[in-house]
Amino acid sequence: MKSAENGGMNRRSFFRAATGAAGGMAALVAALSPLKSLDTSDFTVEKFLQQHYKELDKEEMAKVLARITAEVEERYKVRPDLKDVKPMDGVEFVYALNLGACIGCRKCVHACVAENNQSRDPEIQYIRVLEMPTGTIDIEKGSHNYDHPTVPKDGHFYMPIQCHQCENPPCTKVCPVEATWTEPDGITVIDYDWCIGCRYCEAACPYFARRFNFTEPTIPKAEVNPNMSYLSNRPRHKGVMEKCHFCLHRTRNGQNPACLEVCPVGARKFGDIRDHKSDVSQVLKNKRVFVLKEEVGTVPRFFYYFDEDYHRSEEEGG
């Protein structure tokens, strides 16, 4: 974490700079005009004075987790099992998706919503599934608003899109307070307590993978997932960004992401690319994979491929 003295900017120095440069409360309001959506209803002195995630020691983190646990319990009447799950040494997570197998059922979308305590009203979804005309991978020609009695639809294939956990993520570079960064295992995370809701990261993402809470998220008590992690699926508030984080509270504990587990056709593969025996390593080694928008230089950790049976059926049909 860079200090303000070393050219970095944290949340408090951001606000101090705004007030110092302009002088007075009126100037602060003007300086923060792009942040009108920022919700301050849940601000407390304890939260505001909290150190950046990377600066918290074990004792300080324990206090933060206790505070958030109490907030969640008061808000949802559910006692969460909240942890700070760290990345494993020597692991780099990668996703691969077989477009020839995906049937567009959207079960991954809804499993993700349930697992990650995403708002139900309005519903926030991390995964978009595009219905694509056969013969193109131009996502501008796809639609995520399809509504058919049955899928897949003849003459189409389906392309799920979520955060690509880029090696060169533009979203982290534009955050003025360093509320989002990439962890050693390749997962780009957001600290919801540090986010100021400016939405610069949303604008910078070429995959439309980030979501903003325009209103206070709502989750029925019976649907709250109590197994939570600080950097993943703990409940969010109005005015902050969120996105896919590869279900890090699961994957860092040796489980698969919820979207993979629910897929009825096995189209999704996930694992450690540094483990040469992992499913994703085998896919990258033996399949013709590609990434979306390669030309923008984000170097995604999310790969797509078509299996050989799909290519043969396309050739026979054409």
Image (cartoon, rainbow, N blue to C red):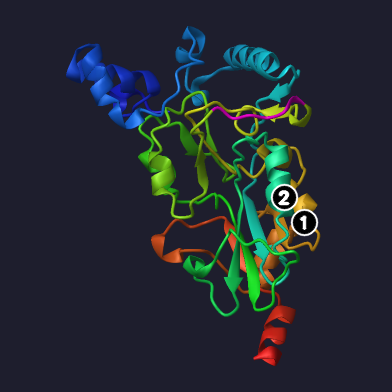
Looking at the picture, does residue 7 appear above or below residue 157?
above
Relative to 109, does residue 213 appear above or below in the rendering? above
Name the mark on residue 168: none
Q: Position of residue 19 (x, y in %)?
A: 25, 16
Q: Are marks 1 and 2 in contact (CB under 8 Å)?
A: yes
- Which residue is rendered at x = 45% and y = 23% of the image? 39
The residue under label 1 is 263
Amino acid, disc 2: Cys
In this view, the residue in front, 299 or 115, is: 115
Q: In the image, which residues are magenta?
A: 216-221
Residue 219 appears in the rendering: yes
Question: Does the magenta-highlighted stretch encompass residue 225?
Answer: no
Image quarter hosting the N terminus: top left
Marks 1 and 2 sit apart, C-alpha to C-alpha, by 6 Å
Say which residue appears at 70% left-offset and 75% top-offset: 307
Picture quadrant of residue 61: top right
Q: Position of residue 18 (x, y in %)?
A: 26, 21
Task: Estimate the x, y position of residue 132 in percent, counting from the top left.
Answer: 58, 70
Compared with 306, 56 (above or below) is: above
- Front residue of this view, candidates 82 and 318: 318
The front one of 76 and 192 is 76
Residue at 47 percent across and 35 percent down: it is: 180
Is residue 32 shown left or right of residue 234? left
Q: List the residue tagged with mark 2.
A: 259
Instruction: Using residue 290 as the reference point, say whether residue 239 is left or right of it.
Output: left
